[in-house]
Amino acid sequence: VRHLLTIGAFARAARLSPKALRLYDELGLLRPAAVDSDSGYRFYDPDQLEQARLIAWLRRLGMPLAGIRRIGALPAPEQAVEIAAYWEQVLAETAERGRLAAFLVDHLSGRGSTMDDDTTLRIRYAARSETGPVRETNEDTAYAGPRLIAVADGVRGLGGDRASAAAVGALKPLETAPIPADDLLGALAEAVRDAQQAIGAIPGDTGQGPATTLTALLRSGSRLALAHIGDTRAYRLRDGELSLITHDHTYVRSLVEQGRLTEDEAATHPQRSLLVRALTGTGDANPDLSLHEAAAGDRYLLCSDGLAAAVPADELRTVLAGHRDPRAALDELIARAYAAGADDNVAAAVADITV
Ligand code: MN
């Protein structure tokens, strides 16, 4: 006969409170080995100690309950991978929030160039979305206008085409809405919430609702607000140098950051498009939000993974630097993606900041 512990004895052994154990039971994280049918008392197996301690540590890490539940069902080596991936995600989000906090500190203390909202800057832009020779449908949406550029890549088979169009469509009112320059990011964040509602209103034909990535830049003078979720990307070409200013929310990106995959391995990984975050109708996935200061001469490229996966960054740089006209640069980028054998839809938008 197996020796079971009372909840009090098990709690002491696990260095947890009985209250925490009752909560874990209610949340489905750790079920008692037995429950007395008369008294309702919970009893635990000493073999459950390790799992109880792991749950306590994961809660201290701030991991959401769904993640703790998923990890609880895995063998130890896979638990290690999952925890490392979770932590990379936390670090990326914290870095993003850190940049936003730094911007706000600068802004509110009146320091830095961020206070000079240069309204003399102009914008030139172009956008295109292509089905390509392989896919039968186009799940990508691209848009460019005087204030807004946006690219979205719908998740295949989940009403992705409608989701990407709905997400970008929900942002378009920003072109004409009155937006105070100091609330640029707030206005964009609110429009992303509208986008989530619009996606939620799409009639679903599958169990999972439609989903899409979204990367959008909203401009007021020299100030740029960036909202980003998924694996669409934003690049900035400045002084001949190309910088990626978004962070891919993909499984392979987290493996690269943990040193478990090389960049080359990631580029050909069979699960390279597996998203850890996307915009859905449920509103539970928050986008990265950040503010940037544009300079005259900057060129911004937003694109779906169809372009970024097919054309290496140094080639993106060469093409972007090689054309004055944004439309010409965009057309050559898309031509190069398909010449390189891209089997995906390609959407991209190019915007130039000029005096
Ligand atoms: Mn794609």
Image (spheres, rainbow, N blue to C red):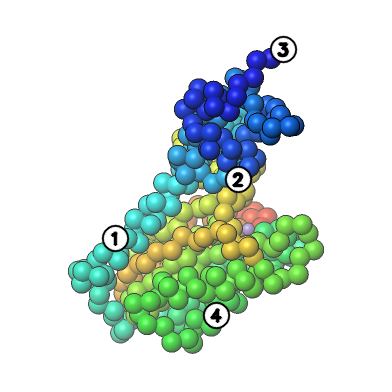
Do the residues under discs 3 and 4 have CB atoms within 8 angstroms? no
Secondary structure under tag 2 reads: helix
- Residue 200 image-quadrant placement: bottom right
Q: Which residue is at a point 64% across and 65% down the rendered structure image?
A: 281
Camera-side residue of 318 and 117: 117
- Which residue is denoted by mark 4 in the rendering? 172
Image quarter of the N terminus: top right
Amino acid at circle 3: Val
- List the single residue furthest toward the top: 1
Q: Could one spot residue 22 in this view of the protein? A: yes
Relative image position of residue 322 (x, y in whole percent):
42, 66
Image disc number at residue 66: 2
Relative image position of residue 225 (x, y in whole percent):
41, 70
Looking at marks 1 and 3 on the same chain, the residue that comes earlier in the sequence is marked by 3
Q: Nearer the viewer, mark 1 or mark 3?
A: 3
Disc 4 crowd, CA 10 A, few/some/many (<14, 14-19, 20+) = some
Is the CB atom of the residue marked by disc 3 within 8 angstroms of ligand 1's nearest atom? no
Is the CB atom of the residue marked by disc 1 within 8 angstroms of ligand 1's nearest atom? no
Camera-side residue of 346 and 326: 346
- Which residue is denoted by mark 1 in the rendering? 102
Amino acid at circle 1: Ala
Q: Nearer the viewer, mark 2 or mark 3?
A: 3
- Which residue is denoted by mark 3 in the rendering? 1
Looking at marks 1 and 2 on the same chain, the residue that comes earlier in the sequence is marked by 2
Amino acid at circle 2: Ala
Distance from the alpha carbon under mark 1 to that under mark 4 = 28 Å
Amino acid at circle 4: Lys
